Image (cartoon, coloured by chain):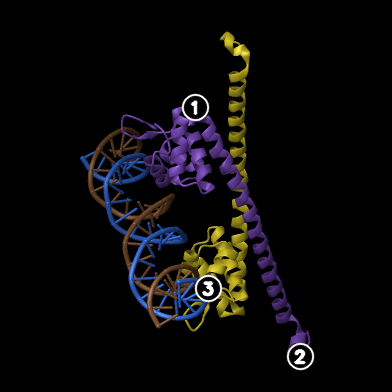
Chain colours: A purple, B yellow, C blue, D brown
DNA sequence: TCTTGACTGAGAGCAACTCTCAAGAGTTAA
DNA sequence: TTAACTCTTGAGAGTTGCTCTCAGTCAAGA
């Protein structure tokens, strides 16, 4: 059993966010102890994991709630759940492509600045510069 | 020269968002025609591209504004700009790793549901089921 | 006993959109 | 030439998903 603080640390999600998710019904039936303190089980960590996964791909909380509710209904909802996961996976792949593209731009910019800085350093310390020529 | 609508289409960013970014000072000096209509140049598209890039990696608008302002100041800010881009690239690489991890979970779930559905289909159409045995 | 350190829910605050709307200008159709 | 239609504009309201603050409860330790 884990407290909300431990779960926050383990799953790298803030306590605030966990409470917000809990309040939004994204974790079904988290147990409380006699002092009303949430006690996350290993099984509950699985819920945190899937919610975090769906969120990180941009699924909105309402859709996550829908998925969770489907899970609770039972086997009859397997086809719909399968569809959700499949669509989410495709979305994740698209995000991967997009991220690759953005990384290319960042690589380009980084190289560009490196060149600028390198040339500037050469200018600074090269005595040729003292001659004030316009040579390249 | 492009209208905001054309830029929205070209860069896959909503007109609303482009106006919001413009109002936030994320594009320097967009020209207007005699009717006060924004006219994005090819050069302006470059700004849209880098702003979109930084946003997509989760940079907040204030930091993007800072980067843009540094660019406008001139060469003296190259080291700081270089640092920003380098840090952003590292952040993007981390996001890539995170996304890969989440994709693994989605792959696992998708396979899991596929198995469930396949078995269910077999159950449905396999006459053995008519015997109502408890055999695996 | 007093303090320290969780944990709680309620609710305010915030970032970044997202949407609605009225106003104004150009374009086309009757 | 007047009406209808389209596009753009800024202002501002609304939404989502946190994020933070705060007052209150409880248990354990000095």
Residue D16 in the figure: left or right of residue B38: left
| Residue B46 seen anywhere in this rendered image of the structure | yes
Q: Position of residue A134 (x, y in %)?
A: 76, 89
The mark that comes first in sequence, 1 or 2, is: 1
- Pointer 1 with pointer 2, Cβ within 8 A: no
Q: Position of residue B57 (x, y in %)?
A: 56, 58
Which part of the image, by quadrant, shows the N terminus of chain A?
top left
Q: Position of residue A65 (x, y in %)?
A: 43, 39
| Residue A6 seen anywhere in this rendered image of the structure | no
Question: What kind of element bears circle 3?
Answer: loop
- Provide the chain ID for the residue under circle 2: A
Residue B93 in the figure: left or right of residue B63: right
Q: Nearer the viewer, residue B65 or B90?
A: B65
Question: What kind of element bears circle 2?
Answer: loop
Residue where numbered disc 2 is placed:
A133
Mark 1 and mark 2, same subunit? yes
Question: What is the CA distance from the residue labelled 1 to the residue labelled 3?
Answer: 51 Å
Residue A76 is marked as 1
Residue B82 in the figure: left or right of residue C2: right
Question: What kind of element bears circle 1?
Answer: helix
The answer to whether B122 is drawn above or below residue A52 in the figure is above
Residue where numbered disc 3 is placed:
B27
Question: What is the CA distance from the residue labelled 3 to the residue labelled 2?
Answer: 37 Å
Q: Nearer the viewer, residue A66 or A103?
A: A66
């Amino acid at each position: 059993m884990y407290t909300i603080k431990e779960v926050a640390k383990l799953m790298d999600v803030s306590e605030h966010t966990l409470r917000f998710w809990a309040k939004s019904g994204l974790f079904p039936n988290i147990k409380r102890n006699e002092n009303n303190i949430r006690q996350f089980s290993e099984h509950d960590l699985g819920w945190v994991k899937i919610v975090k996964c769906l969120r990180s791909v941009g699924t909105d909380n309402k859709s996550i709630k829908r998925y969770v509710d489907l899970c609770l209904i039972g086997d009859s909802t397997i086809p719909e759940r399968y569809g959700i996961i499949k669509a989410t996976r495709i979305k994740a792949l698209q995000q991967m492509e997009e991220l690759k593209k953005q990384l290319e731009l960042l690589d380009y910019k980084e190289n560009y600045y490196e060149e600028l800085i390198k040339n500037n350093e050469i200018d600074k310390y090269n005595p040729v510069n003292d001659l004030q020529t316009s040579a390249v």
